[in-house]
Amino acid sequence: MAVVKKVETKERFMGRLGHGCDLLGELNEICREKNVRLGWLKGLGAVRKACLAYYDQYTHEYQPLEIDRPLEITHLVGNVSVKDGNPFVHAHVTLADEKGHAYGGHLAPGTIVFACEFTLEILSGAVLERAFDETTGLSLWKMSE
Ligand code: ZN
C-alpha cells in the first residue's frame, strides 16, 4: 500500500553552498536553521570527493562507496521530512567523471563541495515522519493517517 499526501509549496529558495563544506551536512544545517518539516531539494555543481552508499536489500546494511576525486554533480535530488523530531535530509546523487561516466547512490557524509547551486522547496499540508520499517530495515515515512 502506498503513502500519498497532498502538499503545497509554501516557499522556495535558491542558493549556493560554500566551497569545501560537507554536502549533506550543509543541506541538513540549512534545513535545521529554517526548521523545514517537509521539502524537496535539487542541485548541481561539482564535488572534490564523494562518499556514497548503496543499500544492500539482503543484508539491510549500507555499503560505503568512496570516490576520492573531483566529479561533476549532474543531479542531486532529495527530500526533507522529520526524523526523531528534527528536519532530516534524504538525498541521492549522480556524479560524472571526466569521461562522462556516472556514479550514483545515497548521499553520505564526507562528500566535499567544490561548488553547488541548489533549490529548496518548502512544502506544507502534510507531516511525513520517519520510523523504522520492519520489511526493508530502513527508516521510512509512516504509513498511518
Ligand atoms: Zn537513500
Image (cartoon, grey):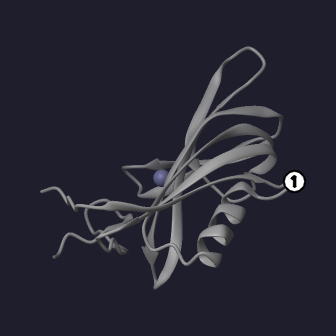
Quarter occupied by the C terminus: bottom left
Q: Residue furthest bottom?
A: 85
In the image, residue 29 above or below residue 75? below
Quarter occupied by the N terminus: bottom left
Q: In percent of the image, x 66 and y 19: which residue is there?
A: 101
Q: Residue furthest front?
A: 11
Q: Name the spot of residue 30 as percent of width and height, x first.
A: 66, 68
Q: Is residue 104 left or right of residue 20?
A: left
Q: Name the spot of residue 81 as percent of width and height, x first.
A: 43, 69
Q: In percent of the image, x 64 and y 48: which residue is there?
A: 118
Q: Is residue 104 left or right of residue 145?
A: right
In the image, residue 80 above or below residue 144? above
Picture quadrant where residue 96 is located: top right
Q: Name the spot of residue 61 as percent of width and height, x first.
A: 48, 58
Q: Nearer the viewer, residue 135 or 6?
A: 6
Q: Secondary structure at mark 1?
A: loop
In the image, residue 53 above or below residue 134? above
Q: Nearer the viewer, residue 27 or 91?
A: 27
Picture quadrant where residue 93 is located: top right
Q: Name the spot of residue 90 as percent of width and height, x first.
A: 51, 59
